[in-house]
Image (cartoon, rainbow, N blue to C red):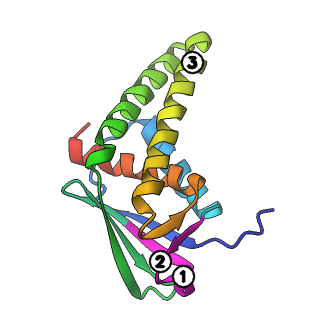
Amino acid sequence: MDTQEKSIIDIKLIGEKALRRSPEIEMERHRALSDMLHHNHFIIKDYENESPYRLELEVVQRTLQIRAKNSEDEDLTTIYIGLKSLQKTIKDYFMMCESFYQIMRKNDHAKMEAVDMGRRAIHNEGAEMLVQMLEKYAECDILTARQLFTLICVLHIRITNL
């Protein structure tokens, strides 16, 4: 059992307006939210003593807004992260996911493993970039960053109408 205290106790995605998402994207969204709530490490600088947090994620004009509240739902701060440097990685991740899902539907196990390795590599790259982008605002482990990257991609679907 995970005895590490979690620093995020609730996370909401604001502005999800995609009318249709594929079942695979819905599964990724659900898994990221669930995994995030079971294991996370996200400590906001200057608000360390206010943990655990309730977070709201929203993408507004290519900027990720992370609104943080304490466990009593009182506003603490908002972190603004420009997503321009992540755009190519997000686009590459979408393309790899689409390829992976197409191959998966065809049940082509030989190609599936290779494409999945590429997909995971791009996912890790996005998470590592996110850790660096957040470092002046918050301390975040790589597993939490991976889930955040997935959720940013889900929110990005609405923005790009993919």
- What's the magenta region? 41-56
Q: Nearer the viewer, mark 2 or mark 3?
A: 2
Q: Where does residue 36 sit, x and y in percent of width and height?
A: 57, 59
Q: Where does residue 38 sit, x and y in percent of width and height?
A: 64, 61
Q: Amino acid at mark 3?
A: Ala
Q: Where, quadrant-wise, is the N terminus in this rendering?
A: bottom right
Label annotation for residue 114: 3
Label annotation for residue 48: 1
Which residue is found at the position 44% from the left and 85% from the top?
73
* CB contact under 8 Å: marks 1 and 2: yes
Q: Amino acid at mark 1?
A: Glu
- Between 68 and 157, the one nearer to me in the picture: 68
Does the segment drawn in magenta span residue 122? no
Helix, strand or loop at disc 2? loop
On screen, residue 109 versus residue 50, left or right, reads: right
Does the segment drawn in magenta span residue 46? yes
Q: Is residue 21 above or below residue 110?
A: below
Q: Amino acid at mark 2?
A: Lys
The residue pinned by badge 2 equals 45
